[in-house]
Amino acid sequence: MKRMGSWRQWLVAVSILLVSGLCMAQSQDEGGQQWYRVDSLNAGLSQASGSVSLRTPREAMRSFRDLTDKGDFEAAAHLLNLADLTPAEQRGRGAELAQQLSEIFQRGKSIRISRLSGRQDAAIEDPTGESPHAGEPRRDIELASLEADGDTYDIRLGRYQVGNEEPVWLIKPESVAAIPPLYEEYGPRAFERHIPESLKHSFGLLRIWEWIAIPLVLLGIALIGKGVYRLIEVVTRWLPSGSPSIFAKQIRGPVALIVMSLLTQALLDYVVSFSAAATITLRVVLIAILAWGTGAVGLRLVDTMMLKMTRRLAGQIDDSKPQDDRKLLTTLYAVRRIIILILVTAVTLYVLGQIQLFETMGLSILASASVLAVLVGVAGQAVLGNILSSFQLSLAKPIRVGDLVMFEGQWCYVEGIFYTHIRLRLWNERRLIVPVTYFASKAFENLSSKSTKEYRSLALTLHLSADISILRDKFLEYAKAEDNVIEHHKLLCCVTDQTGPAQTVTCYLMTVDPLSGWAAEVSVREKLLAFIRDEHPEWWPRDVVVISHRDIARGHATGDEGETAA
């Protein structure tokens, strides 16, 4: 029994040792994931001052900012892990590298210290629980990602522990190695050496000399842009009239903006280097201006080509032109809208890609996508509705460019179908601008839908004694003499109504188009009225007879004054 008891004690002891060993191994592994173990840190540097706090990423970067603002680059060097340098190189170059990194942060990437983790383990805090890595400790985090000479360099903080000392956060050695090329790209330019030290102090977001230099640079760029605008105006006068001069005149503004944008970017790249806040803002604005100017030039080119094609194919836009030409013009307007949509989409994507908006705000955009969708839907409801209606008209083609329509009692030609409106030319040469959704929601008469010809009618009210056969012969004679009256076999003259002592005679005639038909109608009516007045005044209804010295019912003067018509 004693042997069995001793064996049990040995088994329990071995089990405890195994479990404790596994727990120790697990704790060591976990500790190894929370920091990098090193034998020493910056052995070549002097003792760090008490103002250097490296416990959390936020404290480390705040210490670096405060020390570099005071010009204490020797102490700021303790924020760099100089493990790739020898102790002698650490003493000689540590302060210089800290100063260069400070300039990179000022001009290349402004670090939002308040957004850095305030925890020692830099664990991700996500109250929503959406992040799969929430609560996990980190031993390195990214501060910035910058480009220089076509290469991308990351500046990262790492957590290091020497022996049993408290872990600290330092700029990683590979990031320290990237400081020289980044400083070459983002460091101060040669002319800044001549700026007095008193003007290099910070004043708000910028330094004092930047508050003076930025307005002067922008003023100079604006003057150059105005010069480019005037130069294109002069060149336009030398160009032959027509499409070249029209195109040159339309691109004066966009080309001037493009030149101003390119020149400003060249100054930022090779001549002057401002603080990160000013540089980022300027570059975003310049990229947007450059993209907009390029898109505007492309759109003006399309408009000029469409204008030239319109003049060559149709000249004055009306329904007297062949339907195929008018269909082609309508299609060209639809193509123009598609090109505009493509240009706007391409420019937007280019701008967002250049300013890296998706990288820095991607999660925020996704998180607020529903809110943005509601805001855009409410604010842009009218615009989006007009755009969709415009595409609907272009595809279904209930109207074409050049069609004659009767819209709200107005005779008008369709001159253009655009994204948000339709331009109509009234019969008196005025222009009516109608929103597409309003036009599409109203009933309109397309007088050019199938054919431009129209059946017109004119009505005369005559006495019951009027001889319709004589009137019919005269109507046929006058109608056939009109050039715009066609299909003579459809000419018709007959009594359509009778009231008391009068009868209504209606004449019908077919014309080539509505406006020509109106002119033919009034011409025939005038001739018939003149014939009745001169040849058969007795046909006038008795209720319009005027008793006077000259009875107009009898036409020419025939007799005694005061004669009364029967």
Image: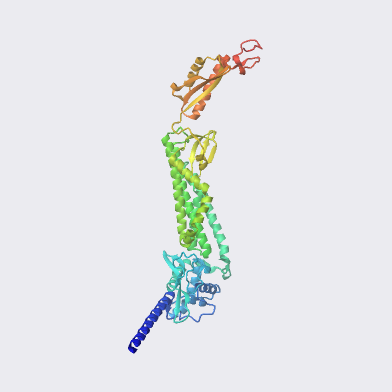
Give the residue drawn at x 48%, y 18%.
477
Q: Is residue 324 visible?
A: yes
The residue nearer to you, when weighing 516 against 438, is 438
| Residue located farthest toward the front when viewing the structure as drawn | 1
The answer to whether residue 498 is above or below residue 47 is: above
The residue nearer to you, when weighing 494 against 177, is 494
The answer to whether residue 161 is above or below residue 391 is: below
Q: How is the image coloured?
A: rainbow
State which quarter of the image contains the C terminus: top right
At which x and y percent is residue 61?
A: 51, 72
At which x and y percent is residue 348?
A: 47, 54
| Residue located farthest toward the top when viewing the structure as drawn | 560
Q: Quadrant of residue 394?
A: top left
The answer to whether residue 278 is above or below residue 29 is: above
At which x and y percent is residue 414?
A: 49, 37
| Residue located farthest toward the bottom when viewing the structure as drawn | 2
Q: Is residue 84 visible?
A: no
At which x and y percent is residue 502?
A: 57, 18
State which quarter of the image contains the N terminus: bottom left
The residue nearer to you, when weighing 490 against 357, is 490
